[in-house]
Image: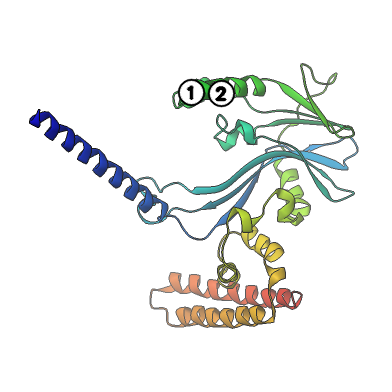
Amino acid sequence: MKFKQLQLVKISIYKKTATIISVLFLLVLSSCHSKDFKISRDFSKVFAWNSDSTAFAFTAITKIYRSPEGIATFPDGGRIKLELYDVALYYYDIKNKTLNRIVDFNDILPLYWKDRYYWSTRILFNDSLIYYKIDTPNKDDIRWVRDRMHDDKDSMKLDQIIHKVSKTYVYNIRRHTIHSTDVLLSKAEWVKFDSEKAKKLRKRCLEKIPCADWGINIQKQFRQSKEIYIDYIVERIGSKISRKCIWEQIAPSFNKEDVKNIIEKMEKYQTKLYKEFKNNDDGPYQESLKRSRYENYTRYFEETKNRLKNVH
């Protein structure tokens, strides 16, 4: 009996030790991602125009994430830590300059964990009707997901998703209704990819849309102190969209002291970049990079000061 009790005690100790190690490992990994958040937005390969070219439909993927650092970058560069992953079908009304969210695809994310499925969404825009069909996952991807299901409830949910995405749907703009359909309009075809048109649309229309219209609220989805948000502006941290959201959602709360603080910090940061450029001893290539960084920041500083004038 004593031997069995001793064995049980050892097993218990091993389990507790393993649990502690696992928790510590997870804590280490969680701390190995950048504190800075980035926001990215990707679009489907097609932008479907209506018949009179006054509106177009598309799929957009919005992400808020942190990049891996330190041990989290091994062995293959690491994975980003997602704070938000949102996928939806939209249409943009050019005349009224309004973005309309038709339907989100977040309920099918357990199966659609690869961006390429959304990029390949088939779309057709005809008058007030928008047809759409998500690319069907291959058997290997379905098997990969099913092997990681925890119980029958998860398996049933997966079956429902597979059934749902097997259909083609149509959205009625006037009635705001969605229903499945077995056929497209007579002689109608799915829109084909047009890269040049997509680039023009993004630049002309979509980049001007406020972050809130895309469902982004950074104070809820990636909460930080005002001081940290200010550092994003000062040091040009994060993505262009990240800073755009800060200007739209955080900057209106800046007071005169905040504005003064930002300008002073930017002056110091500009001086730091200038010293790095002038004191460079790493060769012509590094000198060129540091000069470019300093000159780009100088232009950014002037633009920022002009924007701050409109804050207060």
Residue 36: image location, x then y, percent: 52, 60
Q: In terms of image quadrants, where is residue 170?
A: top right
Residue 142: image location, x then y, percent: 52, 23
Which residue shows up at 20% across the image and 41% down it? 13
Give the residue number, with chain letter if any, for mark 2: 158
Give the residue number, with chain letter if any, for mark 1: 146
Whether residue 91 is situated above or below residue 145 in the rendered picture: below
Q: Residues under labels 1 and 2: Cα distance?
A: 8 Å
Task: Name the kind of residue labelled 2 in the image.
Answer: Leu
Residue farthest along the top direction in this orientation: 182
Whether residue 183 is situated above or below residue 2 in the rendered picture: above
Please name whichever residue, 273 or 281, is drawn nearer the observer in this view of the structure: 273
Q: Are marks 1 and 2 in contact (CB under 8 Å)?
A: yes
The mark tally for this picture is 2
Which residue shows up at 57% across the image and 31% down it? 112
Q: Residues within 10 Å of mark 2 (few under 14, many from 20)?
A: some
Please name whichever residue, 19 or 117, is drawn nearer the observer in this view of the structure: 19
Task: Name the kind of residue labelled 1 in the image.
Answer: Arg
Q: Is residue 36 left or right of residue 242?
A: left
Residue 79: image location, x then y, percent: 45, 46
Whether residue 302 is situated above or below residue 137 in the rendered picture: below
Which of the two labelled residues, at mark 1 and mark 2, occupies the earlier sequence position? 1
Label 2 sits on a secondary structure element that is helix
Q: In terms of image quadrants, where is residue 16?
A: top left
Which residue shows up at 49% across the image and 73% down it? 290
